[in-house]
Image (cartoon, helix red, strand yellow):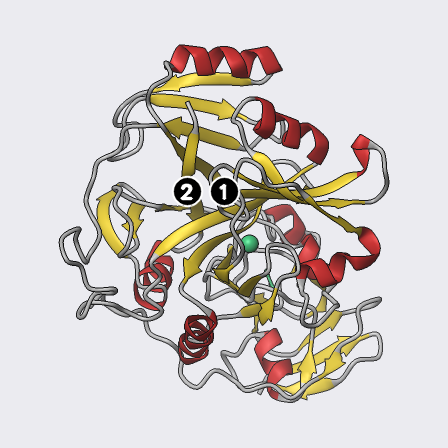
Amino acid sequence: MPHITVGPDGPAIDVPPGETIVEGLRRVGWRARYRCRGGGCGICKCPLVDGAVTYPGPVAESALSAAERSAGLCLPCQAVPLGDVVIEQRGRPLRPMLASAPRVAAPIREEK
Amino acid sequence: MSVIRLGYVHVRVTDLARARDHYQNTLGMDAVHEEDGRVYLKSWDEDNHHSVVLEEGGVGLVKFGYKVTGEDSLAALENRVAGFGATAERMSKGDNAGVGDGLRVTLPSEHVLELYSEVEYLGTKVGKINPDPWPRTGLRGIGVPRINHALITTEDPALLERFFAEVLGFRPAERLVSGDEPGDLVGSWMFCGENPHDIAFVNGPNGKLHHFAYQIDDWSALLRAGDVMSMDEVPIDFGPARHGITRGGTIYFFDPSGNRNEVFSGGYRTGADFRPITWTMDQAARGINYTHREIDQDFLQVVT
Ligand code: FES
Ligand SMILES: [Fe+2]
């Protein structure tokens, strides 16, 4: 299981493969800073200090540009760890929360 | 010429298939037209061709349209825009599917606003003869009846308020101020008919969209909308709550690309003799969320 460490003094958790950083943290009771959870608003953007992530879902260039990616920033609401990762949340500590995970990976429905 | 209502909002979406699913199945709009990378949608109680356009690629506002009465020539309107020092160009029938000739204005806030009087009539789902109050079949998800308003951000709220008042005949219903000087305007909620607002804007970056809203019947429709959002795993921003400003009920939420939507219920009536209400910054949180009296700074900052 990929291991997520949140710096400088945040939790360290394991997430099931395929889960985003934000969703993984939510599931174990931590709210990172996010708003849209859709890769569009950019408010979750933070440094990816170590490790690699992939983006299976959509990410808007205005939320995370190619230059920002290569400068080591990531979008935790859409980023899925490829192995162990370290992200930095300095100045925006996680808040403890009780959150319900999505019940199903929502398929795209046909218009009925 | 007078402005009738917000006609359409045209937004970018990162993934058209996911966006369609949200607007068609969660909100319940119908696709009326498609062309390369764009889908045009209409809500069930709207007469005109479309009220939302989704365009694939990125996120945020492409432009929005207000329908105007047709008696004035476009040239006169063009002159008023030019007289204010803003720029406009003619738009032609077919530039937007179903919409006729009009004027495309670049607002002092850099948003693109289109004004038109001719638009294809498709009719509501219940018709105009002995209609049912809502369609017995074919509603999906929330089943939003119509769009209602948009809230945009501008570096100069006072200038934009003057534009909407002097060029387009809007009036402010509610004003958020940080002091007594004209330049102390932080936000303005303006109307063109008898709504509490048809356009609103707050201080922020030029050219950005904070949200656009659908009007739904009442508080219980709002709560039911929240149920559908939970069933469909829609990210909620805040609500259900009551606005101090406009007195409407609200839920703010996000489409799958991160554009903010709102369902809005209630609100009072205004009109030509309505005297504007003032909110001061120390009570701004109550103005926006009367129920909770606090709002996350990110609610104010996040725009697309
Ligand atoms: S929360 Fe909006 S981009 Fe991540
Ligand atoms: Fe609103």
Q: Where residue B274 appears, x then y in whole percent?
A: 60, 41
Residue A74 in view, yes or no: yes
Are the two marked residues, 1 and 2, in contact with CB atoms closer than 8 angstroms? yes
Identify whether A82 is placed above or below B109: below
Tell me what residue is drawn at x 83 percent, y 68 percent.
A90
Q: Chain of mark 2?
A: B
Identify whether B113 is placed above or below B5: above
Q: Secondary structure at mark 2?
A: strand
Tell me what residue is drawn at x 46 percent, y 61 percent.
B255
Q: Mark 2 belongs to which amino acid? A: His
In the picture, the disc for residue B275 is none
Q: Secondary structure at mark 1?
A: strand
Q: Where residue A76 appears, x then y in whole percent?
A: 62, 68
User: Is residue B140 left or right of B23 when viewed as pictured?
Assistant: left
User: Is residue B50 left or right of B6 when viewed as pictured?
Assistant: left
Q: Mark 1 belongs to which amino acid? A: Leu
Q: Chain of mark 1?
A: B
Tell me what residue is drawn at x 64 percent, y 31 percent.
B160
Label 1 Cα crowd, 10 Å radius (few <14 / some 14-19 / many 20+): many
Task: Check if mark 1 and mark 2 are on a common chain.
Answer: yes
Quarter containing the N terminus of chain A: bottom right
B157 or B233, nearer to the observer: B157
In the picture, the disc for residue B10 is 2
Label 1 sits on residue? B61
Residue A30's quadrant in the figure?
bottom right
Q: Quadrant of ligand 1?
A: bottom right
